[in-house]
Image (cartoon, rainbow, N blue to C red):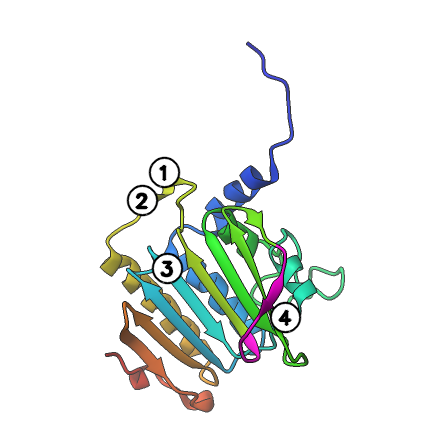
Amino acid sequence: MTMPIRRLPEVIINQIAAGEVVERPASAVKELVENALDAGATRIDVRLDQGGLNGIVVDDDGHGMTADELSLAVERHATSKLPGDDISIINHFGFRGEALPSIGSVSTLNLISRSSASDSAWQVTVDQGVVSAPHPASREAGTRVHVTNLFQSTPARLKFMKTARTESGQCLDMIKRLALAHPDVAFRLTDNGKTSLDLPRRGHDLASGDMAEA
């Protein structure tokens, strides 16, 4: 029987895109930490639950977002990283605006952010692709992203996940590489409350041998 051509629902489109952007917890951590770096963060705190399989928190002291920007941030192809229309001029990690909506389509994604120019913070939640309206919250300037139930809406992806220890190691390696390229940013990584990496801001003289692991 021939089936008619139809447009896929937005949720399915985002889940398909998520398969290209988010392969495992370390992929989500990479996207979120790069967003924090692009936001001018000088401190990035990453907290994992079971290697990121149960939860990921990325907290930064970057520029933060307003309520309107929060709503746009979880829409596909909405980005602050391409101020003009010339895609040959890229000065950030990414510009497609797919990371947050992709992660939110296969998890419960909670964002709390406060713009450095604002007196109040705002919060928005994306639950397996369903976006809430922004509402007031409390925090200092910067952004906190909390990811839970990763891949619950795509159980086939869960079958490819390794042990929590392996996934934690992947996240650690990812953050080490980003930290080496950004010695002027403080990085901290904990998993189940145990500190795996704690790097203060060191300027541009940070060497790989200076990394302190617990």
The residue under the point 37% across, 39% down is 155
Amino acid at pointer 4: Met
Q: Residue at x 36, y 83 (%)?
A: 199
Spatial CA distance of label 3 from label 4 is 23 Å
Image: magenta residue range? 133-142
Category of crowding for the residue at label 1, using alpha-carbon neighbours closer than 10 angstroms: few (below 14), some (14–19), many (at least 20)? few
Q: Amino acid at mark 2?
A: Phe
Tell me the residue that label 1 is attached to: 156
For label 4, the crowd category at 10 Å Cα-Cα, with few meaning under 14, some 14 to 19 and many 20 or more, is many
Q: SS at mark 4? A: loop
In percent of the image, x 31 and y 86: which residue is there? Answer: 210
Q: Main secondary structure of the magenta part?
A: loop
- Of mark 4 and mark 2, the one earlier in the sequence is 4
Query: Is residue 80 at least partly visible in the picture?
Result: no
Residue identifier under label 3: 55
In 3D space, how far apart are the residues under numbered discs 2 and 1 (Cα atoms)?
Answer: 8 Å
Instruction: Give whichever of discs 1 and 4 has the lower sequence position.
Output: 4
Comparing 113 with 94, the one in front is 113
Residue 138: say if magenta.
Answer: yes
